[in-house]
Amino acid sequence: MSFYADLIVALVWILARLERAQVIGQTAVDAGKMKGPPVDGLPATDAMRDLLRMPQSQRQHLEAVGLVMSLKTFDRLVEAAGDPKTTIGDATDLARDLTLRLMDELHLCSFWQVPREHQYLLNPDLFGSEVSNAFPSASGDIEEAGTCLAFGRGTAAVFHLMRVLERGLRSLAETLHDPNLNPERNPSWDSILKKFEAEQRKPIADRALVWRVDDKFFSEIHATLRAVKDGWRNPTLHVGRNYTPEQAIELFVATRSFMQRLATKIHEVPVSSVVEP
């Protein structure tokens, strides 16, 4: 959920203007510049009614944050805008009540600000459309990795990135058409990588069809996955290893680059099980 702080500030600004209109009017009466009864008892002006109507579009944001008590006062305030009996005093009292309710309820909530330089990490399509189209099942983990990074959770981000890379590993394994690499057999990373090594030792003419086309591409892809397994994935699965946001960002960039390159030649097949180390 996103909390739009600027809308809350705008709402409080409207409420403050309502109260200020009452204060200015009453000051004028007290100073003898206006004649008549106290301002509180006068019908609300058109300008005040317009102010009462202005926050209507922000109701959904109060509801999203869960400010249930503020919402009740908010609805009474908006309803008062169309009631011909509403007085200036009624409008300012409702504005004051809503301000206090907002302050009380927001005091019970906790909000986190995502630094401006990390806002891009909240984009669900962080790796680009080519990766999303080639590996749709990885989209959820890509989005979660970005969210974890935006909130400074380096170790959590690395876990999600390992799952993204696993999608690539699985899809690459499918190109060998080896029944031992069937996901239902739950082959390990190491066993899959050893199959890749064995495939590369074969004469090009004897390799799986896809592997015959670009030897350099598959050699580099295999080397990258081997490095990830030894340097990142295996240590990640042990409780003694944690990652700073800076380290996780480094892996994020590398994973994005890897998946973008893989997507130029490989598309995934359905994945139903988890690979163990």
Image (cartoon, grey):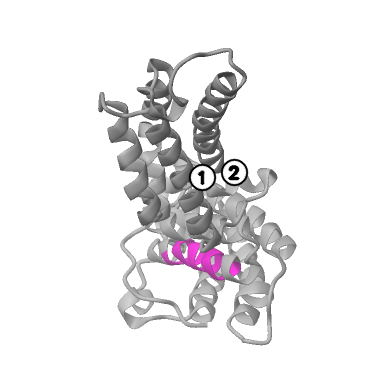
Task: Say which mark, if any, is on residue 120.
Answer: 2
Identify which residue, 7 or 72, lies in the foreground. Answer: 72
Most foreground residue, 245 or 167 = 245
Q: Amino acid at mark 1?
A: Asn
- Residue 127: x and y in percent read 53, 47
> Would residue 241 be found to the left or right of residue 44 on screen?
right
Q: Nearer the viewer, residue 8 or 259?
A: 8
User: Compared with residue 36, is residue 217 higher up or lower down, i.e. above or below?
Assistant: below
Would you call the spot at circle 2 few (<14 residues within 10 Å), some (14-19), or many (20 or more)?
some
Dot 2 falls on a residue whose secondary structure is helix
Residue drawn at (49%, 62%) of the image? 164
Residue drawn at (60%, 75%) of the image:
233
Q: Circle 1 is placed at which residue position?
A: 123
Specify the quadrant of the image occupied by residue 140. Answer: bottom left
In which image quadrant can residue 186 be found?
Answer: bottom left
Q: Main secondary structure of the magenta part?
A: helix
Judged left or right of residue 117, residue 162 is left
Magenta residues (range): 158-170
